């Protein structure tokens, strides 16, 4: 899952398709049992149409930022799969061909980076940027990225004017009074109303199952008989839903940093669990900072580092740094440290400079990007999709008493992210569009082994999610990076993980049992 700005605080055609114009009744798949025959039937119609049309690949529009040899195109999908011949929306895709020979090619590898609301269209740049971790895979696969429905160039949705969205400073997410809570509740309700006003026609259809159906239509448009897929963070839930709906359409699937797929977790409880995991990883980072006090001079114990954090928050609350960086903006910057090990050093460096008298470095790092408002790719769009999908995927509590009780309790021991996370998700409590029942993720007939990769101390997607998905997908294999907590393990240098990812993608083979890997290298403290 992805944290963004804080609200108020910041194909060969598939088997069994249409034959010679005759409508074949869809089989009783996991999808038709769980979501009704209309959607299953609609996917078949859309997939056949997409396979016949293909994708009109061309040089990417200049303002998309992807140079040759990356190509771009669109795939049309139904807004509502129960009405497959009704309104269509366009899904933006891009690709780069495999770097190996024609004989080495194994098809297309599709990617989703998470969110909800993340764009996968930077995936082909792993080839153009010559990322060594993906050199072997890129010999065998075309790398294909896409913007999910509502994201970026794929019929983007919006909930508020982008210029308003980036204005800062936002309200401090940690409330001091009931009046503070009322102010945040008002902002959350207004945000939900804004989503309905600006994008209401899309909201009932902004679900993970619909994005999974889009993924199958993209597969057909690519003339791929089966799907090869890499999903990270929320992309793991997208992959799990796809595997449930279309198990016999999966060829290879890697899910990295796993969302817990239990209906009891999606999405309210998952966010509460995330608050605890973020606090755990925040504590890990503070211990590392303290251990390297000779470099950063922030504090030589975790307790002293925490006190420096509280002092910084209080200072920014009283007088926002540079007039724009308050506590909400600080959280937006500092949360990258518990999220990704790659942020440990730069966040500590920036903080160290601030304590040494250089405020501007922290202001530059934490202030909102006022240029992030143009075109379709913006922080506002990403946040809108995040909210729309999580609110539509599941039924959320509508009682403020429950939200207040749960978050007040959690905040006592997990103060770093709890309230900011609550306000970000609170629009779901007053969401006017339909909220669905989450799909029951499970193994379907024909599903090959799925490779699950997870760090033990992940903040954004707690480890229990990987264990739960592993239980639900028979034949899957779990690779655990022990004593590590970075989000997105497949992007890190750890041969124990990297070699198994390559072996799986190239041969389809997995270990005979689950694997525990030693952690990747701890960041080296430097200034």
Image (cartoon, helix red, strand yellow):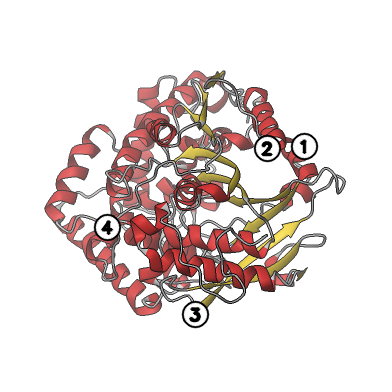
Outermost residue on the bottom side: it is: 86
Q: Is residue 211 visible?
A: yes
* Label 4: how many Cα within 10 Å (few below 14, some 14–19, many 20+): many
Q: State the residue at coordinates (45%, 44%).
A: 444
Labelled pair 2, 3 in contact (Cβ < 8 Å) = no
Q: CA distance from mark 2 to mark 3?
A: 36 Å
Residue receiving disc 2? 505
Element under disc 4: helix
Residue receiving disc 1? 136
Residue receiving disc 3? 85
Residue 134 in the image: state x and y as whole percent.
73, 39
> Which residue is at the front of the view, 20 or 320?
20
| Residue 511 occupies quadrant | top right
Report the mark closest to the observer, 1 or 2.
2
Q: State the residue at coordinates (37%, 29%).
A: 280
Q: Which mark is residue 426?
A: 4
Q: State the residue at coordinates (65%, 30%).
A: 509
Q: Earlier in the sequence, mark 1 or mark 3?
A: 3
Q: Earlier in the sequence, mark 4 or mark 2?
A: 4
Q: CA distance from mark 1 to mark 3?
A: 41 Å
Q: Earlier in the sequence, mark 1 or mark 4?
A: 1
Labelled pair 1, 2 in contact (Cβ < 8 Å) = yes
């Amino acid at each position: 899952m992805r944290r963004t700005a804080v609200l108020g605080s910041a194909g060969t055609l598939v088997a069994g398709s249409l034959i010679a114009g005759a409508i074949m009744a869809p089989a009783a798949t996991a999808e038709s049992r769980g979501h009704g025959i209309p959607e299953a039937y609609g996917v078949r119609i859309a997939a056949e149409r997409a396979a016949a049309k293909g994708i009109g690949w061309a040089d990417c529009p200049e303002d998309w930022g992807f140079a040759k040899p990356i190509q771009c195109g669109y795939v049309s999908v139904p807004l509502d799969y129960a009405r497959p011949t009704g309104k269509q929306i366009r899904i933006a895709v891009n690709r780069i061909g495999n770097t190996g020979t024609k004989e080495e090619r194994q098809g297309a590898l599709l990617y989703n980076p998470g969110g909800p609301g993340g764009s996968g269209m930077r995936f082909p740049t792993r080839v153009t940027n010559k990322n060594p971790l993906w050199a072997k895979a890129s010999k065998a696969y075309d790398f294909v990225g896409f913007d999910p429905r509502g994201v970026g160039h794929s019929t983007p949705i919006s909930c508020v004017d982008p210029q308003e969205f980036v204005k800062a400073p936002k309200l401090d997410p940690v409330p001091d009074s009931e009046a503070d809570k009322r102010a945040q509740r008002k902002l959350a309700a207004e945000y939900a109303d804004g989503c309905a006003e600006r994008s209401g026609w899309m909201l009932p259809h902004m679900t993970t199952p619909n994005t999974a159906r889009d993924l199958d239509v993209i597969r057909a448009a690519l003339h791929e008989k089966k799907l090869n897929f890499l999903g990270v963070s929320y992309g793991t839930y997208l992959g799990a839903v796809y595997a449930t709906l279309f198990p016999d359409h999966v060829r290879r699937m890697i899910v990295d940093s796993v969302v817990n797929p239990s209906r009891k977790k999606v999405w309210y409880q998952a966010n509460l669990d995330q608050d605890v995991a973020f606090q755990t990883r925040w504590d890990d980072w503070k211990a590392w900072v303290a251990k390297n006090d000779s470099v950063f001079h922030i504090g030589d114990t975790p307790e002293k580092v925490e006190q420096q954090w509280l002092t910084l928050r209080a200072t920014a609350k009283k007088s926002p740094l540079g007039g724009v960086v308050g506590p909400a903006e600080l959280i937006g910057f500092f949360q990258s440290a518990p999220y990704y090990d790659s942020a440990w050093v730069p966040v500590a460096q920036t903080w160290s400079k601030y304590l040494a008298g250089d405020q501007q470095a922290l202001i530059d790092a934490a202030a909102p990007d006022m240029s992030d408002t143009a075109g379709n790719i913006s922080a506002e769009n990403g946040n809108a999709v995040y909210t729309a999908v999580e609110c539509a995927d599941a039924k959320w509590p509508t009682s403020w008493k429950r939200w207040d009780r749960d978050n007040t309790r959690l905040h006592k021991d997990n103060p770093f992210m709890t309230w900011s996370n609550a306000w970000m998700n609170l629009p779901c409590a007053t969401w006017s569009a339909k909220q669905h029942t989450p799909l029951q993720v499970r193994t379907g007939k024909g599903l090959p082994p799925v490779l699950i990769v997870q760090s033990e101390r992940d903040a954004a997607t707690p480890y229990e999610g990987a264990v739960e998905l592993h239980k639900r997908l028979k034949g899957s294999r779990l690779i655990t990076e022990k004593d590590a907590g970075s989000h997105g393990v497949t992007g890190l240098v750890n041969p124990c993980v990297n070699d198994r990812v390559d072996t799986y993608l190239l041969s389809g083979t997995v270990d005979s049992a689950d694997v525990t890997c030693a952690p990747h290298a701890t960041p080296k403290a430097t200034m």
